[in-house]
C-alpha cells in the first residue's frame, strides 16, 4: 500500500496499540495515541470520549492532514474523524483500521448502524482477514485485508526465568481469552512455569487467589521488561475463543522468534503456518499442546524464524 499525500496521521483512542504503531511507522504516518482517564473502564466511557473527541479535533485542526487513519474500536473515534473530514469539504479523506474486536465483539453490536454509516464514507476499511473484509463489503463499504505489518522488536537481553520450561501467556484479561482454562491446564505440570501478562486489576479476584504454584502473574509490564520476558521464554501462548481474530500475541511471538501455542482456528492456522502448535481451548487440549511443544521445541523454534522471514517478505511485497 502506498499513500502519497503530504500529511498523514493515525488517530488511536488508546494508551498503546502495537498494530497501529507498526502500521504508522511502516507507512510514514504521525501517530497520536489519545487517551484520558482510565483505559477500558465502561463507567468512564461517556466522559473520556468527550475529552478524547475534543483532543482529536484540536490535533486535526492544527495539523490539517490530507489522510487520516483511525483505529476502530471505538467507533466514536471514527465518528469524530468523519466529522472533521466533512469540515474540509473533501480535502481530507479517512481510512478505518478495523480491528477484529470492532466487528466481532458483542459490545459494539448496538452501534452497528453507526459503524456501517461511517465505513461507507471511508476511503477504505482495513481488516485483518478476508472473512472480515467480505463482511464489510457486504455493508456497501470498500475494504481490503492487511494482516501485517510484522512487528519490529528492538534488540535486547532476555529475562532470566526460573522454570525448567518457561511459557508466557500473552493476555489482557479480555472476555475472549480463556485464562482460567489455561490455569487449569498447567496446575499438574510442575516442570512448566507459566508467566501471565496483563493488568491484574482486570482479573477476577478468585483467579488471583487460586493461582497454582507454577504460575506468575506479571501485571502490566513496561515495554522493555515485556520484551525481556518474551525473549526469556521457551515458548509463547496466545488464545482466543473468537474465530477470525488475529492474535497480536502470536505476532509478537513471531517477532521475538519464539514458537507459539494458539487456538485451533483455520484463520490462525493459515497465518501462523509454521513454528506453531494449535490446540482446543480446553485444559486437556492445552496440556497436550504444551507437551507437544516440549517434545518438538528445537524444530518449532527453527520454523518460527522461517515464518518471521516469510511474513517480512510478504509485507515488503504488499507495501510496495
Image: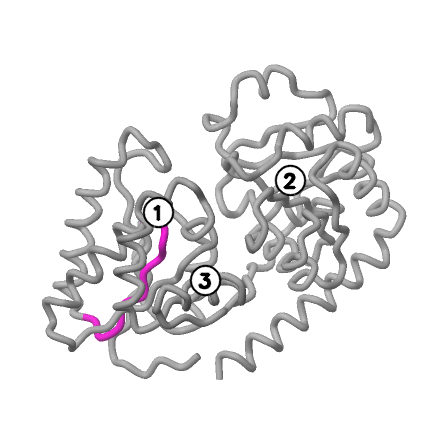
- Earlier along the polypeptide chain: callout 2 or callout 3? 3
**Dot 2 corresponds to which residue?**
169
Q: Quadrant of residue 179?
A: top right
**Dot 1 corresponds to which residue?**
14
Marks 2 and 1, Cα distance to the nearest angstrom?
Answer: 22 Å
Q: Identify the residue at image location x=69%, y=28%.
A: 183
Marks 3 and 1, Cα distance to the nearest angstrom?
Answer: 25 Å
Q: Nearer the viewer, mark 2 or mark 3?
A: 3
Q: Identify the residue at image location x=73%, y=61%.
A: 304
Q: Nearer the viewer, residue 271 or 29?
A: 271
How far across and how far down the image is residue 302, in percent?
80, 62
User: What's the coloring here?
Assistant: one colour
Name the magenta segment's main secondary structure: strand
Question: Within the magenta stretch, is there residue 71?
Answer: yes
Height in image: 106 above or below 272? above
Q: Which residues are magenta?
A: 65-74
Q: Nearer the viewer, residue 224 or 209?
A: 209
Q: Quadrant of residue 70?
A: bottom left
Amino acid at each position: 500500500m502506498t499513500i502519497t499525500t503530504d500529511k498523514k496521521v493515525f488517530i488511536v483512542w488508546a494508551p498503546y496499540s502495537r498494530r497501529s504503531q507498526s502500521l504508522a511507522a511502516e507507512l510514514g504516518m504521525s501517530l497520536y495515541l489519545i487517551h484520558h482517564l482510565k483505559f477500558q473502564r465502561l463507567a468512564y466511557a461517556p466522559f473520556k470520549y468527550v475529552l478524547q473527541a475534543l483532543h482529536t479535533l484540536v490535533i486535526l485542526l492544527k495539523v490539517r492532514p490530507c489522510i487520516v487513519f483511525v483505529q476502530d474500536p471505538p467507533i466514536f473515534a471514527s465518528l469524530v474523524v468523519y466529522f472533521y473530514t466533512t469540515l474540509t469539504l473533501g480535502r481530507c479523506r479517512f481510512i478505518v483500521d478495523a480491528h477484529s474486536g470492532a466487528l466481532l465483539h458483542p459490545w459494539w453490536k448496538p452501534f452497528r448502524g453507526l459503524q456501517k454509516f461511517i465505513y461507507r464514507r471511508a476511503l477504505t476499511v482495513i481488516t485483518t482477514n478476508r472473512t472480515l473484509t467480505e463482511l464489510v463489503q457486504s455493508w456497501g463499504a470498500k475494504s481490503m485485508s492487511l494482516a501485517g505489518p510484522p512487528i519490529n522488536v528492538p534488540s535486547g537481553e532476555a529475562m532470566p526465568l526460573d522454570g525448567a520450561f518457561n511459557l508466557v501467556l500473552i493476555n489482557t484479561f479480555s472476555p475472549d481469552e480463556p485464562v482460567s482454562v489455561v490455569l487449569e491446564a498447567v496446575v499438574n505440570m510442575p516442570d512448566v512455569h507459566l508467566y501471565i501478562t496483563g493488568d491484574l486489576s482486570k482479573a477476577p479476584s478468585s483467579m488471583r487467589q487460586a493461582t497454582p504454584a507454577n504460575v506468575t502473574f506479571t501485571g502490566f509490564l513496561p515495554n522493555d521488561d515485556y520484551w525481556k520476558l518474551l525473549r526469556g521464554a521457551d515458548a509463547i501462548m496466545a488464545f482466543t475463543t473468537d474465530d477470525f481474530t488475529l492474535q497480536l500475541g502470536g505476532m509478537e511471538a513471531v517477532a521475538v522468534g519464539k514458537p507459539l501455542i494458539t487456538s485451533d482456528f483455520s484463520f490462525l492456522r493459515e497465518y501462523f503456518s509454521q513454528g506453531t502448535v494449535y490446540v482446543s481451548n480446553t485444559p486437556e487440549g492445552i496440556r497436550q499442546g504444551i507437551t507437544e511443544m516440549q517434545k518438538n521445541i528445537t524444530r518449532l523454534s527453527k520454523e518460527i524464524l522461517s515464518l518471521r522471514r516469510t511474513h517480512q517478505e510478504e509485507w515488503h511485497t504488499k507495501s510496495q
